[in-house]
Amino acid sequence: MQTFRVNGYDMAYLEVGEGHLLVCVHGTLGDFRTWYSVLGPLSKSHRVISVSLRHFFPEHWDAIGDDYKMAQHVADAIAFIEQVTPGPVDLMGHSRGGHIAFRVAQARPDLLRKLVLAEPGGDLDSSLPVPEGTPAHPPLAARTARSVEMIRAGDLEGALQNFYEGIEGDGSWRRVPAAAKQQLRDNALTFLGQINEQRRPYTLADTQAIRTPTLLIGGGATTGGLSVMWRVLAGHIAGARTAVIENAGHWMFEQAPLEFGAVVDAFLAE
């Protein structure tokens, strides 16, 4: 593990491999360990840096303070990439990390060569309507709020199960490997910050501002709003490519690492 001093914070990261630089940003409850399953495949042809955002493991945050904000994490990611040489870099984000990567591309396209978004999280505003006939899906924000209530009541395990099964379906928590569960437990208190992180919804103007060559990836088995979001964004980002990892859900890089790595490799090699 190494660190860069970023906006007054020691931002931890792992670095493996050689080649063009790929920076990977985790999502909710993740950290630099999120990408372990694909570090091997990706590092065969890339220099891969996997970062931990502010207040995530290896820090054990006490949920005190007001700097757990989407804007802060975007600013930290930008400052981190500015310290990495040589640039520009390829940037990949998953879920909430996909939202962060999107905002980095929107604000600082000069830092990026290519952008990979694996089921980015967030909300769509009215300028980005979902296709007619799309089933209504309960917002993940409601699941997050319920998990926060459970953590405050002392039920950390129940909070994690509630959130995870809200994405992957009932009964999915018991199938999560022990190491992956521990990673989620290590970051459970970051839920408390996410309630008030002031995340802005995606707008049509936001998507039209993305000029970095972009690949959006979805899991073939993902259900709910996350299965819709990336497709809507892809329809409005100029020249965006798409790929589906069949028989995998939201954590597709853990469930199908070789397939996921091959899709990312092919896009970055173009």
Image: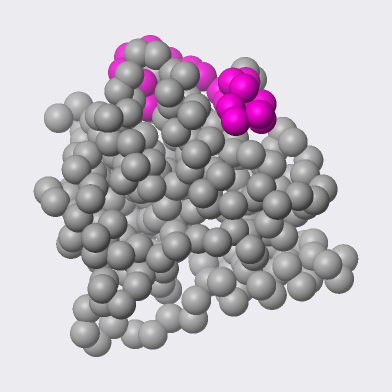
What range is drawn magenta here? Answer: 3-22
Q: Residue at x 38, y 56 (%)?
A: 119
In the image, 133 versus 73, the foreground residue is: 73
Q: Where is residue 51 in the image (x, y as percent from the top left)?
A: 54, 31
In the image, 20 versus 54, the foreground residue is: 54
Q: Which residue is drawn at 38% across and 47% down?
A: 103
Q: Where is residue 102 in the image (x, y as percent from the top left)?
A: 36, 48
**Figure check: 213 above or below 39:** below
Q: Which residue is drawn at 83% across and 67% down?
A: 152
**Figure check: 190 above or below 203:** above
Quadrant where the image shows the C terminus: top left
Q: Position of residue 245 (x, y in %)?
A: 32, 52
Q: Is residue 259 visible?
A: no
- Is residue 29 rendered to the left or right of residue 58? left
Q: Residue at x 42, y 73 (%)?
A: 224
Q: Where is residue 124 in the image (x, y as percent from the top left)?
A: 36, 70
Q: Identify the main secondary structure in magenta.
A: strand
Q: Residue furthest right?
A: 154
